[in-house]
Amino acid sequence: MADLTLIPVATTARQGKRGGHRLRRLGSLVAQGVVTLFLVSALVFFATQALPGDVAKMILGKTATPDRLAVLREQLGLNRPLLVQYWDWLSGVLHGDFGESLANHEPVTSLIGERLVNSLSLALAAMLVIIPLSLLVGVAAATHKDSWFDKGFLGVSMVINALPDFIIGTLLIALLATNVSHLLPPVSIIPVGDNPWQHLSAMILPVATLSISGVFYLGRLVRVSFIDVTNSEYIEMARLKGMSQRVITFRHALPNALAAAIPAASLVAAFTIGGVVVVEYVFNYPGIGMLLVESLGNQNLPVIQALVLIVAVSYFFFNRLADALERR
Protein backbone atom coordinates (compact mmCIF):
# COMPACT_ATOMS: atom_id res chain seq x y z
CA MET A 1 0.00 0.00 0.00
CA ALA A 2 2.85 2.35 0.80
CA ASP A 3 4.38 1.85 -2.63
CA LEU A 4 1.05 2.41 -4.38
CA THR A 5 0.47 5.69 -2.59
CA LEU A 6 3.99 6.94 -3.29
CA ILE A 7 3.67 6.60 -7.06
CA PRO A 8 1.07 9.32 -7.67
CA VAL A 9 2.78 11.59 -5.13
CA ALA A 10 6.08 11.26 -7.00
CA THR A 11 4.34 11.78 -10.32
CA THR A 12 2.60 14.89 -9.01
CA ALA A 13 5.91 16.22 -7.71
CA ARG A 14 7.56 15.73 -11.10
CA GLN A 15 4.65 17.44 -12.85
CA GLY A 16 4.89 20.32 -10.42
CA LYS A 17 8.60 20.72 -11.13
CA ARG A 18 7.97 20.67 -14.87
CA GLY A 19 5.21 23.25 -14.51
CA GLY A 20 7.47 25.48 -12.42
CA HIS A 21 10.27 25.12 -14.96
CA ARG A 22 7.93 26.10 -17.79
CA LEU A 23 6.69 29.13 -15.88
CA ARG A 24 10.25 30.26 -15.13
CA ARG A 25 11.20 29.75 -18.75
CA LEU A 26 8.15 31.71 -19.92
CA GLY A 27 8.94 34.50 -17.46
CA SER A 28 12.53 34.59 -18.67
CA LEU A 29 11.42 34.80 -22.31
CA VAL A 30 8.96 37.60 -21.51
CA ALA A 31 11.64 39.53 -19.58
CA GLN A 32 14.14 39.10 -22.42
CA GLY A 33 11.53 40.26 -24.91
CA VAL A 34 10.69 43.39 -22.90
CA VAL A 35 14.36 44.33 -22.48
CA THR A 36 15.09 43.68 -26.16
CA LEU A 37 12.14 45.74 -27.36
CA PHE A 38 13.12 48.56 -25.00
CA LEU A 39 16.65 48.56 -26.45
CA VAL A 40 15.23 48.43 -29.98
CA SER A 41 13.01 51.44 -29.29
CA ALA A 42 15.96 53.39 -27.87
CA LEU A 43 18.15 52.49 -30.85
CA VAL A 44 15.42 53.50 -33.30
CA PHE A 45 14.80 56.85 -31.60
CA PHE A 46 18.41 57.95 -31.13
CA ALA A 47 19.49 56.69 -34.56
CA THR A 48 16.76 58.71 -36.27
CA GLN A 49 17.63 61.75 -34.16
CA ALA A 50 21.21 61.46 -35.45
CA LEU A 51 20.10 61.82 -39.08
CA PRO A 52 21.76 64.83 -40.74
CA GLY A 53 19.74 67.98 -41.34
CA ASP A 54 17.55 70.37 -39.38
CA VAL A 55 13.88 69.42 -39.18
CA ALA A 56 12.81 73.03 -38.62
CA LYS A 57 14.66 74.18 -41.74
CA MET A 58 13.21 71.31 -43.73
CA ILE A 59 9.70 72.51 -42.81
CA LEU A 60 10.14 76.31 -43.07
CA GLY A 61 12.75 76.38 -45.84
CA LYS A 62 16.25 77.77 -46.04
CA THR A 63 15.02 81.38 -46.01
CA ALA A 64 13.41 81.09 -42.56
CA THR A 65 14.62 83.55 -39.96
CA PRO A 66 16.31 82.37 -36.73
CA ASP A 67 13.34 83.61 -34.70
CA ARG A 68 10.85 81.54 -36.71
CA LEU A 69 13.12 78.49 -36.48
CA ALA A 70 13.37 78.92 -32.71
CA VAL A 71 9.58 79.20 -32.36
CA LEU A 72 9.02 76.06 -34.46
CA ARG A 73 11.62 74.09 -32.50
CA GLU A 74 9.84 75.12 -29.32
CA GLN A 75 6.46 74.01 -30.71
CA LEU A 76 7.84 70.65 -31.86
CA GLY A 77 9.79 70.09 -28.66
CA LEU A 78 13.07 69.81 -30.55
CA ASN A 79 14.89 72.05 -28.10
CA ARG A 80 14.30 69.72 -25.14
CA PRO A 81 16.91 67.20 -23.95
CA LEU A 82 16.98 64.00 -26.01
CA LEU A 83 16.18 61.81 -23.01
CA VAL A 84 13.04 63.84 -22.31
CA GLN A 85 12.02 63.61 -25.97
CA TYR A 86 12.63 59.86 -25.94
CA TRP A 87 10.56 59.31 -22.80
CA ASP A 88 7.65 61.35 -24.19
CA TRP A 89 7.82 59.43 -27.49
CA LEU A 90 8.03 56.02 -25.77
CA SER A 91 5.12 56.87 -23.48
CA GLY A 92 3.03 57.76 -26.50
CA VAL A 93 4.03 54.57 -28.34
CA LEU A 94 3.00 52.44 -25.36
CA HIS A 95 -0.43 54.08 -25.58
CA GLY A 96 -0.67 53.60 -29.36
CA ASP A 97 0.22 57.21 -30.16
CA PHE A 98 3.17 57.69 -32.54
CA GLY A 99 2.79 61.46 -32.67
CA GLU A 100 2.01 63.69 -35.63
CA SER A 101 3.58 63.87 -39.05
CA LEU A 102 5.81 66.92 -39.38
CA ALA A 103 4.85 67.29 -43.03
CA ASN A 104 1.05 67.66 -42.73
CA HIS A 105 0.35 67.39 -38.96
CA GLU A 106 -1.70 64.25 -39.57
CA PRO A 107 -1.58 61.55 -36.86
CA VAL A 108 1.10 59.01 -37.74
CA THR A 109 -1.19 56.06 -36.96
CA SER A 110 -3.77 57.16 -39.56
CA LEU A 111 -1.02 58.00 -42.06
CA ILE A 112 0.60 54.56 -41.94
CA GLY A 113 -2.61 52.54 -41.47
CA GLU A 114 -3.47 52.06 -45.15
CA ARG A 115 0.19 51.65 -46.13
CA LEU A 116 0.61 48.98 -43.48
CA VAL A 117 -2.37 47.03 -44.83
CA ASN A 118 -0.81 47.12 -48.31
CA SER A 119 2.53 45.85 -47.00
CA LEU A 120 0.93 43.09 -44.93
CA SER A 121 -1.07 42.00 -47.98
CA LEU A 122 2.17 41.79 -49.96
CA ALA A 123 3.96 39.79 -47.26
CA LEU A 124 0.97 37.46 -46.78
CA ALA A 125 0.72 36.79 -50.51
CA ALA A 126 4.44 36.01 -50.62
CA MET A 127 4.17 33.54 -47.74
CA LEU A 128 1.18 31.86 -49.38
CA VAL A 129 3.43 31.25 -52.38
CA ILE A 130 6.62 30.40 -50.49
CA ILE A 131 5.31 27.68 -48.16
CA PRO A 132 3.62 25.30 -50.65
CA LEU A 133 6.23 25.79 -53.38
CA SER A 134 9.16 25.25 -51.02
CA LEU A 135 7.54 22.03 -49.75
CA LEU A 136 6.97 20.86 -53.31
CA VAL A 137 10.48 21.51 -54.62
CA GLY A 138 12.18 20.44 -51.37
CA VAL A 139 10.42 17.07 -51.26
CA ALA A 140 10.93 16.56 -55.00
CA ALA A 141 14.66 17.25 -54.68
CA ALA A 142 14.95 14.94 -51.66
CA THR A 143 13.09 12.04 -53.29
CA HIS A 144 15.30 12.41 -56.40
CA LYS A 145 18.53 12.94 -54.50
CA ASP A 146 21.64 13.34 -56.69
CA SER A 147 19.53 13.53 -59.84
CA TRP A 148 19.84 16.35 -62.36
CA PHE A 149 16.83 18.05 -60.76
CA ASP A 150 18.38 17.89 -57.28
CA LYS A 151 21.76 19.17 -58.45
CA GLY A 152 20.14 21.91 -60.51
CA PHE A 153 17.96 22.96 -57.56
CA LEU A 154 20.96 23.21 -55.23
CA GLY A 155 23.01 25.14 -57.78
CA VAL A 156 20.26 27.63 -58.57
CA SER A 157 19.42 28.08 -54.87
CA MET A 158 23.02 29.08 -54.11
CA VAL A 159 22.90 31.73 -56.83
CA ILE A 160 19.42 33.03 -55.92
CA ASN A 161 20.13 33.28 -52.20
CA ALA A 162 23.30 35.25 -52.94
CA LEU A 163 21.35 37.92 -54.86
CA PRO A 164 19.69 40.84 -53.01
CA ASP A 165 15.99 41.42 -53.57
CA PHE A 166 16.44 44.58 -55.64
CA ILE A 167 18.59 42.67 -58.15
CA ILE A 168 15.95 39.92 -58.47
CA GLY A 169 13.23 42.56 -58.88
CA THR A 170 15.21 44.41 -61.54
CA LEU A 171 15.77 41.18 -63.47
CA LEU A 172 12.05 40.36 -63.34
CA ILE A 173 11.20 43.82 -64.65
CA ALA A 174 13.68 43.37 -67.50
CA LEU A 175 12.26 39.95 -68.39
CA LEU A 176 8.52 40.48 -67.87
CA ALA A 177 7.75 44.19 -67.84
CA THR A 178 9.74 45.78 -70.70
CA ASN A 179 9.03 46.35 -74.35
CA VAL A 180 10.67 42.99 -75.07
CA SER A 181 8.10 41.08 -73.02
CA HIS A 182 5.49 43.44 -71.64
CA LEU A 183 3.44 40.85 -69.76
CA LEU A 184 3.10 42.70 -66.44
CA PRO A 185 3.18 46.34 -65.30
CA PRO A 186 6.67 47.45 -64.18
CA VAL A 187 5.15 49.77 -61.56
CA SER A 188 2.64 48.58 -58.96
CA ILE A 189 0.03 51.33 -59.07
CA ILE A 190 -2.77 50.86 -56.55
CA PRO A 191 -5.25 53.77 -56.16
CA VAL A 192 -5.62 55.26 -52.70
CA GLY A 193 -8.30 53.47 -50.71
CA ASP A 194 -8.38 50.38 -52.94
CA ASN A 195 -7.73 46.90 -51.63
CA PRO A 196 -4.45 45.58 -53.11
CA TRP A 197 -6.14 42.23 -53.75
CA GLN A 198 -8.30 44.03 -56.33
CA HIS A 199 -5.15 44.74 -58.38
CA LEU A 200 -3.54 41.33 -58.63
CA SER A 201 -1.53 42.21 -61.74
CA ALA A 202 0.19 44.98 -59.78
CA MET A 203 1.13 42.52 -57.01
CA ILE A 204 2.54 39.70 -59.16
CA LEU A 205 6.07 41.04 -59.67
CA PRO A 206 6.58 42.27 -56.06
CA VAL A 207 5.26 38.96 -54.71
CA ALA A 208 7.45 37.01 -57.13
CA THR A 209 10.51 39.01 -56.04
CA LEU A 210 9.87 38.24 -52.38
CA SER A 211 8.97 34.62 -53.07
CA ILE A 212 11.87 33.49 -55.24
CA SER A 213 14.59 33.72 -52.60
CA GLY A 214 12.22 32.41 -49.91
CA VAL A 215 11.24 29.33 -51.95
CA PHE A 216 14.84 28.34 -52.64
CA TYR A 217 15.98 29.00 -49.05
CA LEU A 218 13.14 27.14 -47.34
CA GLY A 219 13.05 24.46 -50.04
CA ARG A 220 16.68 23.62 -49.39
CA LEU A 221 15.97 23.23 -45.67
CA VAL A 222 12.94 21.03 -46.41
CA ARG A 223 15.14 18.88 -48.65
CA VAL A 224 17.74 18.33 -45.90
CA SER A 225 15.08 17.63 -43.28
CA PHE A 226 13.25 15.18 -45.56
CA ILE A 227 16.46 13.30 -46.38
CA ASP A 228 17.31 12.99 -42.67
CA VAL A 229 13.85 11.61 -41.91
CA THR A 230 13.87 9.09 -44.77
CA ASN A 231 17.23 7.78 -43.56
CA SER A 232 15.94 7.21 -40.01
CA GLU A 233 15.36 3.77 -38.49
CA TYR A 234 11.56 3.92 -38.27
CA ILE A 235 11.31 4.70 -42.01
CA GLU A 236 13.52 1.67 -42.69
CA MET A 237 11.19 -0.41 -40.52
CA ALA A 238 8.21 0.88 -42.52
CA ARG A 239 9.91 -0.26 -45.73
CA LEU A 240 10.65 -3.69 -44.24
CA LYS A 241 6.97 -4.04 -43.31
CA GLY A 242 6.10 -3.64 -46.99
CA MET A 243 4.47 -0.21 -46.86
CA SER A 244 4.20 1.56 -50.18
CA GLN A 245 6.47 4.51 -50.94
CA ARG A 246 3.44 6.81 -51.14
CA VAL A 247 2.30 5.89 -47.62
CA ILE A 248 5.85 6.20 -46.26
CA THR A 249 6.31 9.62 -47.87
CA PHE A 250 3.01 11.30 -46.99
CA ARG A 251 2.04 9.56 -43.74
CA HIS A 252 5.40 9.14 -42.02
CA ALA A 253 8.24 11.09 -43.60
CA LEU A 254 6.56 14.35 -44.60
CA PRO A 255 4.91 15.21 -41.22
CA ASN A 256 8.22 14.70 -39.40
CA ALA A 257 10.12 16.72 -42.00
CA LEU A 258 7.58 19.53 -41.65
CA ALA A 259 8.09 19.66 -37.88
CA ALA A 260 11.77 20.43 -38.44
CA ALA A 261 11.05 22.98 -41.20
CA ILE A 262 8.42 25.05 -39.33
CA PRO A 263 10.96 27.15 -37.37
CA ALA A 264 12.69 27.96 -40.65
CA ALA A 265 9.35 29.13 -42.07
CA SER A 266 9.13 31.68 -39.23
CA LEU A 267 12.59 32.95 -40.14
CA VAL A 268 11.54 33.25 -43.77
CA ALA A 269 8.53 35.32 -42.63
CA ALA A 270 10.93 37.64 -40.79
CA PHE A 271 13.14 37.99 -43.88
CA THR A 272 10.04 38.64 -46.01
CA ILE A 273 8.91 41.51 -43.79
CA GLY A 274 12.39 43.01 -43.95
CA GLY A 275 12.50 42.59 -47.74
CA VAL A 276 9.15 44.31 -48.22
CA VAL A 277 10.79 47.73 -47.72
CA VAL A 278 13.27 47.21 -50.58
CA VAL A 279 10.80 45.54 -52.94
CA GLU A 280 8.22 48.30 -52.52
CA TYR A 281 10.80 50.89 -53.51
CA VAL A 282 11.79 48.91 -56.62
CA PHE A 283 8.18 48.62 -57.85
CA ASN A 284 6.86 51.89 -56.39
CA TYR A 285 4.37 49.83 -54.40
CA PRO A 286 2.35 52.04 -51.98
CA GLY A 287 3.31 50.40 -48.70
CA ILE A 288 5.38 51.25 -45.65
CA GLY A 289 8.60 50.89 -47.67
CA MET A 290 7.70 53.73 -50.03
CA LEU A 291 6.40 55.80 -47.11
CA LEU A 292 9.72 55.28 -45.33
CA VAL A 293 11.67 56.50 -48.37
CA GLU A 294 9.41 59.56 -48.67
CA SER A 295 9.76 60.31 -44.95
CA LEU A 296 13.54 60.04 -45.10
CA GLY A 297 13.52 62.55 -47.94
CA ASN A 298 11.69 65.23 -45.92
CA GLN A 299 13.13 64.31 -42.49
CA ASN A 300 9.70 63.34 -41.13
CA LEU A 301 11.08 61.87 -37.88
CA PRO A 302 7.82 60.66 -36.22
CA VAL A 303 6.89 58.64 -39.32
CA ILE A 304 10.44 57.26 -39.71
CA GLN A 305 10.53 56.22 -36.06
CA ALA A 306 7.13 54.52 -36.24
CA LEU A 307 7.91 52.59 -39.44
CA VAL A 308 11.37 51.43 -38.37
CA LEU A 309 9.99 50.35 -34.99
CA ILE A 310 7.15 48.37 -36.63
CA VAL A 311 9.58 46.54 -38.95
CA ALA A 312 12.04 45.88 -36.11
CA VAL A 313 9.34 44.55 -33.76
CA SER A 314 7.90 42.31 -36.51
CA TYR A 315 11.35 40.94 -37.29
CA PHE A 316 11.98 40.34 -33.59
CA PHE A 317 8.63 38.59 -33.12
CA PHE A 318 9.17 36.10 -35.94
CA ASN A 319 12.73 35.40 -34.81
CA ARG A 320 11.51 34.66 -31.28
CA LEU A 321 8.72 32.51 -32.71
CA ALA A 322 11.24 30.51 -34.74
CA ASP A 323 13.43 30.07 -31.65
CA ALA A 324 10.47 28.91 -29.53
CA LEU A 325 9.32 26.43 -32.19
CA GLU A 326 12.84 25.06 -32.58
CA ARG A 327 13.22 24.48 -28.81
CA ARG A 328 9.97 22.52 -28.71
Image (cartoon, grey):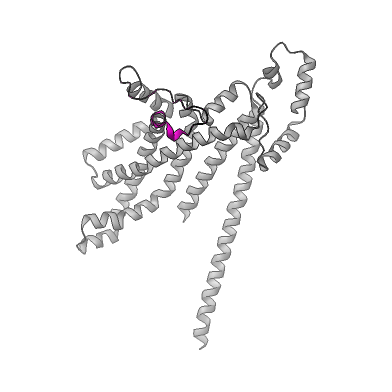
On screen, residue 231 versus residue 221, left or right, reads left
| Residue 55 against residue 161 in the figure, above or below | above
> In the image shown, does 37 or 76 lie closer to the viewer?
76
**Which residues, given as a range, are shown in magenta?**
181-204
Answer with the quarter of the image where residue 200 lies: top left
Q: Residue 157 appears at what percent x and percent y?
A: 33, 35
Answer with the quarter of the image where residue 91 lies: top right
Q: Main secondary structure of the magenta part?
A: loop
Q: Residue at x 67, y 25 (%)?
A: 102
Q: Residue at x 77, y 13 (%)?
A: 65
On screen, residue 305 versus residue 225, left or right, reads right
| Residue 283 against residue 274 in the figure, above or below | above
On the question of residue 78 being in view, the answer is: no
Q: Residue 56 appears at what percent x and percent y?
A: 71, 20
On the question of residue 215 being in view, the answer is: yes
Q: Residue 244 appears at what percent x and percent y?
A: 20, 58
Farthest residue, direction top: 63
> In the image shown, does 315 or 221 lie closer to the viewer?
315
Q: Residue 119 appears at what percent x and percent y?
A: 49, 34
Q: Residue at x 61, y 56 (%)?
A: 27
Report if residue 184 lies within the magenta region.
yes
Tag count: 0
Farthest residue, direction bottom: 1
On screen, residue 25 versus residue 183, left or right, reads right
> In the image shown, does 167 or 327 lie closer to the viewer?
167
| Residue 103 against residue 147 in the figure, above or below | above
Report if residue 273 lies within the magenta region.
no
Q: Residue at x 45, y 40 (%)?
A: 124
> In the image shown, does 111 or 212 lie closer to the viewer?
111
